Amino acid sequence: MPAEAVEIAAGYAFDGPALDLGALLWGGECLADAQIRIPLPMLNRHGLVAGATGTGKTKTLQLIAEQLAAQGVPVFLADIKGDVSGISAPGEAGDKVAERARDVGQEWEATGFPSEFYALGGIGTGIPVRATITSFGPVLLSKVLQLNQTQEQSLGLIFHYADQKGLELFDLKDLRAVVTFLTSDEGKPELKGIGGLSTVTAGVILRALTAFEAQGMGDFFGEPEFDTSEFLRLAPDGRGLVSVLELADVQDKPQLFSTFLMWLLADLYNDLPEVGDVEKPKLVFFFDEAHLLFNGASKAFLQSITQTVRLIRSKGVGVFFVTQTPKDVPADVLGQLGNRVQHALRAFTPDDQKALKATVRTFPDSAYDLEEILTGIGTGEAVVTVLSEKGAPTPVAVTRLRAPESLMGPVEAGALERAVRSSVLYSRYAEVVDRESAYEKLSAREAAAEAEAESARKKADSGPRGGGGGGGGGGGSVVEQVVGSGMFKSLLRSMGTQIGREISRSVFGTARRRR
């Protein structure tokens, strides 16, 4: 090999366990003896897979996921286009696969990997993944509802009240009931001491909730709430389970699914213990179409993402953002991504050319002309730099990537349906549960108040005058009679079982305590 190629290859000669990405490309030749790899312990230092449409990003995800699963590491994949389900089935041999394997020195063997399939709210084929409104929290919900900063703060106030009063927000009707109550004559005083809730802002929130539900998105919220620890399981043979979240049926709702992915990540962060540096990650999470998460995000929201990404590494979780160019990812987040696989970029427009130059600047100095390389490499080829076992960046390596050993495409619809229904998790999450929560409690409270008021009116009409309806001292109003009634006190006791145990929330406002 040329001296430059030898030097690059030496940077990837790791002693410990590693994932094999492919072989070095130098001078237009694929050098099968120069293997490009990622150390397994460095997978929790996060990464970026980028490139223009059609350059092979999805196959790169599949390749990395396969090898992680084979080494006992669970993987989470978001399947936006519906073509990742093939990871569960053995691949199909062919001339192109054989040629690729020969070029990169790969001993290719058709292999399927243990997989579970999920669907947001049960829309599509998969085990339903739902979150309660309480758990989702005000920050993420504000992004989904496209609220401004003032409205987001008001929504946070509503959640604060519900948390304090033990009003469980399981689904959208629960949140709507609390907002309606807090703008009623009876409810307005509840928030007076901490800022109050304007009728105008409440109206905006209620209209946003109504529009959101009218678009069929209410199914994503409710019970049973998905336990994200399910993503950490191993198959009986010791391989890591590949969790595939099927998003093809909701790809027209990008803001929802990108924010929901962030909830999954935040929930994992909240529940997992600190483990520090580990021999291999506990989970690697692939965040596809990452630009959708950052589009229109507030400064506070971006700060929360940055903090979560930075700190979740110590929980043993690696996060790979998948997008078209590094410019799609804010600089503070990009700085946390130690492993890079950059597929080809297009430079057809002035904006494309700016993005290309910006991408080149994010790589360490190298012997390659990266501007030329990134516009000329083919499908299934990429510019790679990762963190070595010592945590230092490896030399930039133009790489011809290996071929995935599982099916490069979707599995047949019937096989997918059978896999979902045979899962041990299907019976746990398939059927919606509607427990007593804020809606039922506030409805009961209103009914009790009406009943007590009616009773008080009847007593006032038939009883002796001057009693004040129960000794109110001149202030024996209907409200005071209701508050003093036995029925209402019983309701308050049931509503107040969580008072004093306000839900602790994370940087995203997601609930820390598992219900």
Image: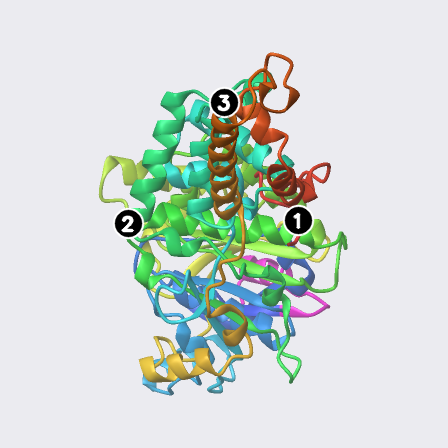
Disc 3 and disc 2 in contact, CB within 8 angstroms: no
Q: Amino acid at mark 3?
A: Lys
Helix, strand or loop at disc 2?
loop
Indicate the quadrant where residue 211 lies. Answer: top left
Please state which of the two labelled residues, at mark 3 or mark 1, is closer to the viewer.
Answer: 3
Identify the residue under disc 3. Answer: 188
Relative depth, front residue between 417 and 211: 211
Q: Residue at x 30, y 39 (%)?
A: 353
Compared with residue 30, is residue 440 higher up or lower down, i.e. above or below? above
Please state which of the two labelled residues, at mark 1 or mark 2, is closer to the viewer.
Answer: 2
Identify the residue under disc 1. Answer: 270
Q: Which residues are magenta?
A: 1-18
Disc 1 and disc 2 in contact, CB within 8 angstroms: no
Indicate the quadrant where residue 496 lies. Answer: top right
Q: Amino acid at mark 1?
A: Asn
Q: Residue at x 48, y 31 (%)?
A: 458
Q: Which mark is residue 215?
A: 2
Compared with residue 512, is residue 406 higher up or lower down, i.e. above or below? below
Q: Which mark is residue 177?
A: none
